[in-house]
Structure formats: C-alpha cells, structure tokens
C-alpha cells in the first residue's frame, strides 16, 4: 500500500478494528489488507495488542484504529458505493446490513460497526437530475419512499408509469 496521499481513519471501540477489516475485506472484491501495528512496551495499550490495521477497498485507503469508547460514528460522514446495476446494489445492501446493520432512507445504511454507507446505482443520479423537472421530481419522490434503492421502480416513476 502506498504511504502517499490520503487515508481515512475509522475509529473503532472494543478492539473491533481487526473484526471490521475482516468484514469489509469479505464484502468488497477489490480489497487488500496492509500492515498491522501493535502496541509495544511504551503503551498505552497492552503490549502486543492491535493499534491499527491498514486496508484498501476499491482503491480507497483506510486505517482501522482501536481507539476506545471516546468517539462514535455518525451519518455526518458516509461512504458512497457507486453500483453498476441492481445486482451490485443488492449485494452491498445485503452484506453491509448483515449482522446488525440498519437500513436508512434513500439508499443509506449503517453497518454493524456504525459506519454509514450510501449504496447508489450510478444511473440514479441521471434520473433524479434530469433537466425535465417533472421526470426528475417523480424519480426523486420514488427514491424518497425507499430504503434500499430499487432502480426499476425509480425508472418507472421517472417515465411516468
């Protein structure tokens, strides 16, 4: 993994960084694990316990940190997954909500670790941003009524069916 550029650090509680990384690596096909850093005798954690795990998902660098209970995830930050089709939407939605994830409106969800994701079919933006305001409004209203995005239903609303 490159050490240049940016990496997003995700702060986990209860020493769940490795569990989270293993889960994300199982969800995203184009993923890899990098270096794992352990505490040494200098602490502050027990020597040998995991501090951070570096990983990549679809080319995006992340660092999972066992940070403790001080900070929690919120919807103020989310990761958008651009999906080629409904099958990809269905895959990511099912995998990221398994084991205690929570469905949210308009293609948003929280996984079992509390991380927020937007699972978005690429064609959705074209439908809700259509220059024809009536078509865009129908598509947007259909989207607002959903949790997981059903692209065919949005397409039908866009077309006035």
Image (cartoon, rainbow, N blue to C red):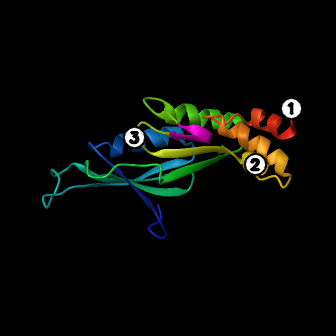
Which tag is nearer the camera, tag 2 or tag 3? 2
- Examine the rendering and report whether any part of residue 57 can be seen: no
- Examine the rendering and report whether any part of residue 102 can be seen: yes
Seen from the viewer's position, the closer of residues 8 and 146 is 146
> In terms of secondary structure, where does tag 3 sit?
loop
In the rendered image, residue 107 lying in the magenta stretch gets the answer: yes
For the magenta stretch, what is the residue range? 104-109
Tag shown at residue 128:
2
Residue 89, percent from left and from top:
64, 37
Tag shown at residue 113:
3
Which tag is nearer the camera, tag 3 or tag 1? 1
- Residue at figure coordinates x 77%, y 42% from the top left: 139
Residue 113, percent from left and from top:
39, 40
Seen from the viewer's position, the closer of residues 98 and 48 is 98
Residue 115 drawn above or below residue 51? above
Determine whether, in the image, residue 138 is placed left or right of residue 95. right
Tag shown at residue 161:
1
Report the Cα–Cα distance between label 2 and label 1.
15 Å
């Amino acid at each position: 993994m490159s050490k240049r550029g940016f990496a997003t650090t995700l702060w986990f509680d209860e020493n769940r960084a490795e569990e989270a990384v293993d889960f994300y690596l199982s969800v995203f096909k184009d993923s890899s694990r990098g270096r794992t850093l352990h505490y040494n005798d200098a602490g502050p954690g027990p020597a040998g316990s995991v501090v951070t795990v570096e990983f990549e998902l679809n080319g995006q660098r992340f660092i999972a940190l066992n940070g403790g209970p001080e900070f929690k995830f919120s919807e103020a930050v989310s990761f958008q997954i651009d999906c080629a089709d409904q099958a990809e939407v269905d895959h990511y939605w099912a995998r990221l909500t398994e084991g205690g994830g929570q469905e949210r409106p308009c293609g948003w969800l929280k996984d079992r670790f509390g991380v927020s994701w937007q699972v978005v079919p690429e064609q959705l933006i074209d439908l809700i941003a259509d220059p024809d305001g009536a078509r865009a409004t129908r598509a947007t209203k259909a989207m607002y009524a959903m949790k997981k995005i059903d692209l065919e239903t949005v397409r039908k609303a866009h077309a006035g069916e």
